[in-house]
Image (cartoon, grey):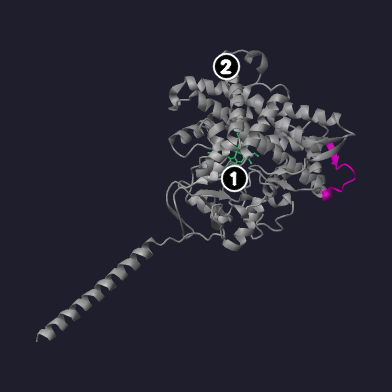
Amino acid sequence: MEIFSSFETFLLSLFSCIILVIFILIKWFSFDSKNRKNIPPSPPKLPIIGNFHQLGSSTNRNLQILSQKYGPLMLLHLGSIPTLVASSNEAAREIMKTHDVSFCSRPSLIASNIFFYGSKDVAFAPYGEYWRQLKSLVVLKLLSNIRVKSYKKVRENEIVDMIQVLGESCGTTIDMRPMFTSLTNNIICRIALGRKLDGPKYQKLLSRIADMFNAFYIGDYFPWLSWVDHIVGSIQRAEKIAKECDEFLERTIEEHVNNKKREDAKGDEEEDFVDILLDLQKDNTSGLQLQRDTLKALILEVFAAGTDTTQTSLEWALSELIRNPRVMKKLQQEITEIGKGKSMIYEEDLERMPYIKAVVKESLRLHTPLPFLLPRKLVQDVKVMGYDIAADTQVIINAWAIARDPTLWEEPNEFRPERFLNNSIKYQGLNFEWIPFGAGRRSCPGIQFSLPVMELALANIVYKFDMALPNEIKNEELDMTEAFGITTYRKFPLVVSVSPRF
Ligand code: HEM
């Protein structure tokens, strides 16, 4: 009996143990399946550097190739920063429309913290009330349609000056890059500061700032190695240039505060941006206290965001026109018909020139100036296209690859402005197959500011001049290699010989 009862106890204990193990296994499996994440596919990575070795010097192309294997949403590890890469129009739509509010912050980057006083500008400020107020101030007060239209004379005057310099260069060869650099710098300086900057010193300062933005800072991707940036001197270099820039901005603001130079420099022009910002600083009704650092960050932002992008777009567009004589001829016909022997093309003439608008759009498609737009940062966990994406992930959108996607664009590598004639694709980021200015809350507020400059400059150049490549290089042989940075430049500046059309 005793044996039987201990056997019974043994069986009972064994049974309880089995039940307990089954229970634990069920619990464990159900816990795991609930918590198992569906992470986007990732290319294989190396220890420490992650996927950096796969980026190469043509990052836009290399990411496009990777996306053909790993899909439109890939998760890369750039050093220790998880980075989601979107490479299709659907993925871009999910990020910048469906989940825009989750994806609308920016990563904290070393250069933006150094140059923009701790990212106090619009483009790099983290998402929040400060950014919201600042962006609406910029959109409503500095870059509104009415305000931008009021600077029409500035644009036209500067283009007349450029055409004159080009005219004086007829019969010789001329590098178009410095031409476009001074055109955009002069226009932005006059609009933002009320006057042009004298001499090459400031042009140089602006280009050094751009270089510092394009530089690579180890601490951005390996925060635990940020001391290396100090050892190699990149932080010190950036800080030195930022100090020079700060002195310049301080001087400019003081000049405006003291109302020196203003009266004689401005003539019949509208208020410049510094004037407007100083007025807004006094008038507190916007609810945003415009501190001195914010003011300086905003002034610098206009230069940083507006010069490089516009000048590189102009250089690419003119390159494509030279490389495609058929398009150049058609454009010259349109412009000549509207120009009818006038001394120049004016902004109001552009309204009757659908082809120039298509040329600019097509050039922005093939040569998206910011191929990855500006990086975003995810503010909360979110599910996108069935994948779980964790808060704080950095996000880049390969707008360049989307604009050359053969499933969206017929013969995507051809320059064919006709594809933008009679269609409804707008600049404002509603058609995700073409987003040179981004989309959603963080989209570019400078569209209306840069378009008239690009369209008017191109229209006047091709109205007045025929252009050919020097040294008997055939037009179609023009080298179109890209130099990769935040902004995609031509690797080799566009050098042309110019002859008058009439
Ligand atoms: C061809 C000329 C230009 C191009 C291609 C361009 C492109 C872009 C792109 C792609 C973004 C990021 C959008 C996103 O994250 O979705 C951006 C942001 C921005 N752009 Fe532009 N831009 C141009 C000209 C300008 C100009 C002239 C200004 C000002 C005068 C300007 C001011 C800004 C600002 C302030 C932001 C930040 C917006 C934010 O973060 O909320 N841009 N731009």
Q: Residues within 10 Å of mark 2 (few under 14, many from 20)?
A: few
In the picture, residue 72 is in which quadrant? bottom right
Give residue 83's position: percent from left, percent from top: 53, 51
Residue drawn at 40 percent across, 62 percent down? 36
Q: What x and y, as percent, mark residue 242?
A: 59, 28
Residue at image location 61% in from the left, 25% down from the top: 244
- Among the two numbered marks 1 and 2 on one chain, the one whose residue lies closer to the N terminus: 2
Residue 56 part of the magenta-drawn span: no
The image quadrant where one finds the N terminus is: bottom left
Does the magenta-highlighted stretch encompass residue 468?
yes
Give the x, y percent position of residue 172: 88, 34
Q: Which residues are magenta?
A: 465-477
Q: Which residue is mark 1?
A: 373
395 versus 122 height, above or below: below
Q: Secondary structure beneath disc 1?
A: loop
- Tell me where residue 314 sits by quadrant: top right
Between 84 and 141, which is closer to the camera in this rendering? Answer: 84
Crowding near the residue tagged with mark 1, few <14, some 14–19, many ≥20 C-alpha atoms within 10 Å: many
Which residue position is annotated with label 2?
254
**Closer to the camera in the image, 319 or 105:** 105
Name the residue located 58 percent from the left edge and 45 percent from the top edge: 438
Where the C terminus falls, by quadrant?
A: top right
Type of amino acid at the residue the image marks with label 1: Leu
User: Is any atom of residue 429 visible in this view?
Assistant: yes
Q: Secondary structure at mark 2?
A: helix
Picture residue at 60% right of the left edge, 18% below the top: 251
